[in-house]
Amino acid sequence: MTSSAAKLERMEGETVELVCEFNGSQFNLFDNPVVWYKTQRLHHHGSDGVVEVYSESAQINMMRTVLAPFAATKRFKPSFHPTPPTYRFALTIAGDLKCNI
């Protein structure tokens, strides 16, 4: 199975579509569910000056079902388009995305 990487740049408030497109000769969605995760890297600056970096992740979906807490926002929509041997799984995140610091 192969997939290509991409870099996305969007303006604040724009809708984003994340795409995972891959080729698989014997892909089976039941045996190999496609799952999206939200992962963020966290930096903790200790009083001793040591910076600890760790990450946390949360599963967004199970197949086409969006899981809590993401389902409550109604902004996430997964889709699956099989055209063997190519498969396209996308996650659309509706606009109103903001980065608050």
Image: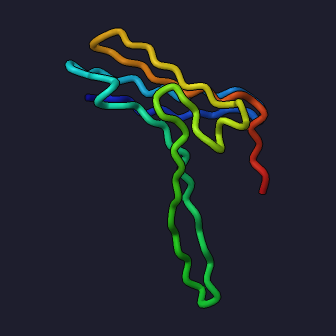
* Front-lying residue, 50 or 39: 39
Residue 35 percent location from the top left of the image: 44, 36
Q: Quadrant of the C terminus?
A: bottom right
* Front-lying residue, 98 or 90: 90
Residue 42 percent location from the top left of the image: 58, 64
Residue drawn where x is 63% and y is 34% of the image: 9
Residue 52 percent location from the top left of the image: 53, 75
Residue drawn where x is 58% and y is 38% of the image: 67
The part of the image, by quadrant, that contains residue 34 is: top left
72 sits to left or right of 55: right
25 sits to left or right of 74: left
23 sits to left or right of 59: left
Residue 19 percent location from the top left of the image: 49, 26
The part of the image, by quadrant, that contains residue 86 is: top left
* Front-lying residue, 51 or 35: 35
Judge whether 45 appears above or below 62 on screen. below
Q: Quadrant of the N terminus?
A: top left
Count of labels shown? 0
In the displayed image of the protein, which residue is found farthest to the top?
A: 83
Residue drawn where x is 51% and y is 61% of the image: 55
In the displayed image of the protein, which residue is found farthest to the left?
A: 25
Residue drawn where x is 45% and y is 23% of the image: 89
Q: How is the image coloured?
A: rainbow
